[in-house]
Amino acid sequence: QVHLVESGGGLVQAGGDLRLSCVASGDTFSTVIMGWFRQAPGMEREWIGAIAWTSGSTNYAEFPEGRFIISKEIFKDTVYLQMNDLQPEDTALYYCARSKLSSAWYGTSSSYDSWGQGTQVTVSS
């Protein structure tokens, strides 16, 4: 079991940037993939991207179009989501999640076994 805590959300104007953090504790040794997701009110949860825990390789959904960057500091058991040029449609609750499965690389939600509580990002126009 891994405990995940996100932080860094807030209110930002359109065009602004935010960096979200996700600190993992517990059984991080079993981690293969860390992912970021978001969910807007009334919408399905949406996968943003994933990072391989050991190598740091990343894989992204299409929609960020290069605006979002995932990184990690393995010695701090922390992953980051750098979000640039935020737009009102990016308003959502952002979650990090952990997987012990390589299938999580493509964003399959069921592949992730631990989830954080989320951090709210609100982008004003």
Image: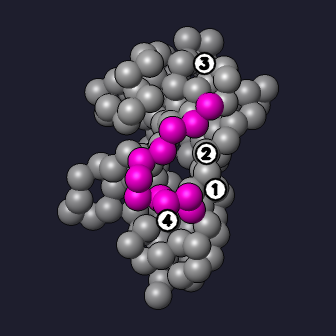
Specify the label residue 82 is tagged with: 1
Residue 109, numbered label:
none
The mark nearer the N terminus, 2 or 4, is 2
**Nearer the observer, disc 3 or disc 2?**
2
Residue sitting at 42 percent across and 69 percent down?
91
Residue at the extreme right: 75
Q: Disc 2 marks which residue?
A: 70
Q: Are marks 1 and 2 in contact (CB under 8 Å)?
A: yes
Give how far apart the Cα atoms at labels 3 and 2 are: 18 Å
Q: Amino acid at mark 2?
A: Ile
- Residues packed near mark 4 inside 10 Å, few (<14), some (14 to 19) or many (20 plus): many
State the CA–CA distance, disc 2 to disc 4: 16 Å
Instruction: Write down the region rendered in magenta.
Output: 57-67
Residue depicted at 32% across the width and 62% down the height: 40
Residue for badge 4: 121
User: What kind of residue is marked 1?
Assistant: Gln
Residue 48 x %, y %: 44, 48
Judge from the rendering whether residue 115 lies leftward or rightward of residue 28; answer left or right: left
Q: Earlier in the sequence, mark 3 or mark 2?
A: 3
